[in-house]
Image: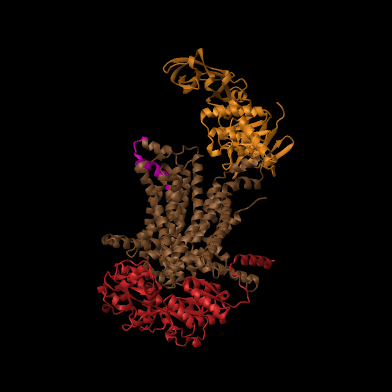
Amino acid sequence: MIKRMLCLGVLSAVALSACGQSGEERVVNVYTARHYSSDDFVYANFTEATGIEVNVISAGGDLLIERVRADGDRSPADVIVTVDAARLYRAEQAGLFAPTDFSQLAGTLPANMMDPQGHWIAFAGRARVIAYSTERVDPSELSGYEDLADPRWEGRLCMRSSDNAYNQSLLASIIAHRGEDFAESWATGVANNLARPPSGGDTDQITAIAAGECDAALVNHYYYARLARSENPDDQAVATAVDLFFPGDSEFGTHVNVSGAGIAANAPHPAEAREFIAYMLSDDAQQAFAELTNEFPVTGFDGYDNALVRDYVSIRQDSINLGELGEHTETAQRIFDRSGWP
Amino acid sequence: MKVDPVPLAGLAALAAATPLVAVAVLAATGPLDGYLAHIARTRLGDYLLTSAIVSLTAAILSGLIGVTTAWLVARCEFAGRSTLQWALALPLAVPAYVAAYAWLDLSQAAGPVAAMLRDAGFDGVAAALPAIRGPFGAGLIFAVTLYPYIYLLAREAFSGQSADTYDAARTLGHGPVSAFLKAALPMARPAIAAGMALVVMESLADYGAVSHLGAPTLTVGIVRAWAGAGALADAARLAIVLAAIALLLFSLERAQRRRARSSAGSGRRKPPRRIRLAGWAAAGAMAVCLFPLLAGLVLPMARMVWLAFEAELARGLFAAFRHSAILASLSGLFAAALGLGTAYAVRNRSRLARISARVASLGYAAPGAVAAVGVIAVLSFIQTGLDSLWGGRFPVLLTGTVLALLFAYLSRFAAAAIGPCESALERVTPALDGAARTLGEGPLGVLRRVHWPLVSGGAITAGLIVFVEVLKELPATMILRPFNFDTLAVVAHNFAADERLGQAGAPSVLLVLTALVPMIYVARKIVKESAIEELG
Amino acid sequence: MSTPLLSVRGAQRALAGNPVLRGADLDLTSGRVTALLGPSGSGKSTLLRAIAGLERLDAGEIRSGDALWSARGQHLAPELRRVGVVFQDFALFPHLTAAENVAFGLRGIPKPERRERAITQLERAELAHRADAYPHELSGGEQQRVALARALVFRPDIVLLDEPFSGLDRRLRAQLRTETVAALRAAGLAALLVTHDAEEAMEAADDIALMADGVIVQTGTPEEVYLKPASLLAARLLGDVQTWSGKVESGLVQTPLGPASAAELSEGHAATVLIRPEGVDRVAGGIPASVLSKRLHGGRARLLVQAGGEGSWTVETPLANSAEPGQTIELGLNPMFTRVFPD
């Protein structure tokens, strides 16, 4: 009797649920924190190349982690993708990834771009760098991240809120390289130099520099690259008034964060998941990331049409293992909380 | 045949309360890793201060806007009044986060207005242009998008008041303004306070607008405790604090609403006649009424349309629209049914039902992302139960179904559905039942011929309010939706999160347009209905 | 008197644990209007609702002819009783026009005919021109007339009216009362008019049933109940009374305004004398009393006087035969308006 009632429930649930999946097709279920429309293009190419259908749920990394955790061994997730190393670390800590031997895929991938235990592997990079006014700042003035805490920048910096994951991972790397005390005095110094309370996104900080509200900001490189490659004259004007400084030779190099993926511990389609991740590291996908979202290819692939990215990617990057950033993220946030960087 | 609506009320309460209970369980059982103490030493004061500034700014400004426009529309006659009286409710269709994106973009130094001024040589003016950001900016955004709550309630109060009190004040030597402040305003105070409570509650639970504008309220602190520090249990604890504040506001709102009804008095009232304005006075009244409409609806939408034209059109908009419409319509239907059931149960004076109705209103009290985590927890609990009943893997995974989304929406918006149904049912006095029965109708006939015509309006209103809210909802939609199931809000959010405001424009505008259609219906209906009551 | 069309015997009903009806008896007769008069809270409306079938009985019974309508554990649904009811707030359906309201109770008849009959009924109430107006567009008086039309249109044998004039102003009230009673008599049905207004009851009704504390304390024609109240309580329900307590001596009770006859009472028994304001006449050689003040009351004068040095009394006299404050007048009791009750 109970079974019959449950059956009815199932029928109505299936009728209402929009995802009709047939068992014959090969599919891969991707839970991703990436929300770029260009990814649809990559998925379509993947399906064409492999015959594997891609089912996607996109949401914030933390919500994805909560859902996979709650669904437990029922979770349909095959691949979990996040856009921040700290989230990869957190998902790994929650036991959501199946350790995988990525060595065949790794190829030319720098060693710091994958988890030593094979829980996850990066497939695209993004640098957090200094945007500055070409009018009011001489590039020779700039030496690196640490310098931004100097009182000489007082009232000249625009920053995004310290809620932002990329600010947190930058501070995490400063903690890793220079220790907590230094990191705290740095965060406090930067907070004191703010020209205005944080608001808006990275692009808003760049346009604020162009509009003369402040002289420098910390931003992800691809927002600037997007403006620089835009055909819109307003964007062009902003890109002329602002340039990026990559702290390559000074300090610990350019801070890079990644989009990374791992195979879910309870993946119903582990083979397809593996193929999916392999495709993310293929030249086709790497080219799409470089050209459509201005992200850094991670495999050393060079055959893309984006001079700006090619320049940027050649600058020395921090070689810290990205997983280590995750370990310091909570400390980083506590330091931000104390520093007065809203 | 006796229809017993109490189980429906219980269902509504269960739907609304369980996610919050799950959050409470999390708060009570999660690990104590000291984040709470850390946050209390560092940011908590700022969060609370910002919350106070944001919600007070929102309450005061929306109060001023709502009361002034309500008075003008209810008691004065001027060109455009009959259109304005429903149009003034429309900014409710605009999600606060969309208004925040548009207004920050419009007003910042890098925005189009400042650029135009600089091009025209007014650099000084451009530099002095105040950008809409920070706690006061966020308060302003909430004021222009949420003032309709106050406007609608105050307008009803003003047009329901007998003109006698105002006239009496005038004969006792008060000028028009003084008579308004001394006689009309105090009588409308409960209605205004009830509206303000709603404004404060929504602005406290918002995340999208405040985080974009740089106004870190307690809700930002909650999301940060979870997302940044990974302290989900501590985030739940902070959320319980917020829920307690909201609960307090909600009971205040209910108490004030009751008073509003009793102070409206009974018996036959002399309907107020409107003061005819002409010339400058009429132009001024129209300007005052147009301002919030421009600020809350027209300007932000115009900016989004402008941006949408500059950017390439996002793909999949039609599918997103279809998904949004399906979700919103289904939840609207269910919410209306639950709302009606609960209202009937309350009318039958069941104590259980009354408690259920109050509990159902708790759904409003948690920030969306936290409520979504609660829903996930509840669903996984139910799944475990189903799996063990089934004796194996139950064929359907609840998360990622439309059912899960409906559950999440109902838990969040049940209160919005119960309210209109309850007030619609208030028009069905027991005497009407008696009259119909003595005229030869059986119980079902009474339902069909008397109750349904009278409460269908309330039920439709309830359904449409939930329709609009579901269109705007984001966190639960994102995490609980089935595969490949984008909605307009999700598409708009994805582009906005990628800082492609231009491409976010089209889905945002489409979302607001979809919400506007039912909003116009609801607003016109509410206005028409109270016009009937004021004559009766 | 013909046999009653409806009879209530020993009706009991408790609401929320409080006994509201405590054994009420009532008869309604064809062609007669019975007023149910009592203070608020006495159970009038509950009795009306019990007759209409909107309230069940805990004990006692309600019968109409041979049919048992209500008894303990037995209840005929209101829609099967075919009783017309005019509610206190009229209970017009706000979503229906006047004509649709009137036609509501007409069932099993083709639609056009229903409307025709409703219009005819409205014509009788001189409201045909308002047939398509909604309740909120009607004045209070018009609403009342629609409510009455709705209760009469299906030609019930019994009509119940619950304070049907209470929300209206005084002049309109008198006019509507006359109209309503005329309509009820014309229809030849049994009507029950619930009211707390003694004047209304006496003017409109053929019979008055006095109700207090959940029981009917006295029933009779207006004259009977006014002139021969069965108790002090009954007397008070019908108008102003003043009382004097004394002992029976030689078949009389002495009051400051003279002796009252108490022939039925035994000698020396304590008794209360009940005197209506119109029960004191000016008589030459009567008891002298000084006039304290004078007010007009419905075209007659009401004097406040002091007599025998003990307390003040209200005396009603014709205006033409009145007196001014400060004057001394001579008074005597009129036995017709004076009653003596044993304590």
Q: Is residue A216 visible?
A: no
Residue shown at 39% from the left, 65% from the top: B212
Q: Main secondary structure of the magenta part?
A: helix
Q: Is residue C284 left or right of residue A155?
A: right
Can you tell which chain is drawn orange? Answer: C
Residue shown at 73% from the left, 38% from the top: C67
User: Looking at the figure, which quarter contains the C terminus of chain C?
Assistant: top right
Colour logic: by chain
Q: Colour of chain B?
A: brown
Q: Colour of chain A?
A: red
**Percent from the top left, x then y, of residue A141?**
26, 78
Q: Is residue A262 left or right of residue B168?
A: right
**Percent from the top left, x then y, of residue B510?**
48, 61
On screen, residue B170 above or below A89: above
Residue at the top extreme of this rendering: C284
Residue at the right extreme of this rendering: C66
Bounds of the magenta span?
B171-189
Nearest the viewer among A20 and B230 is A20
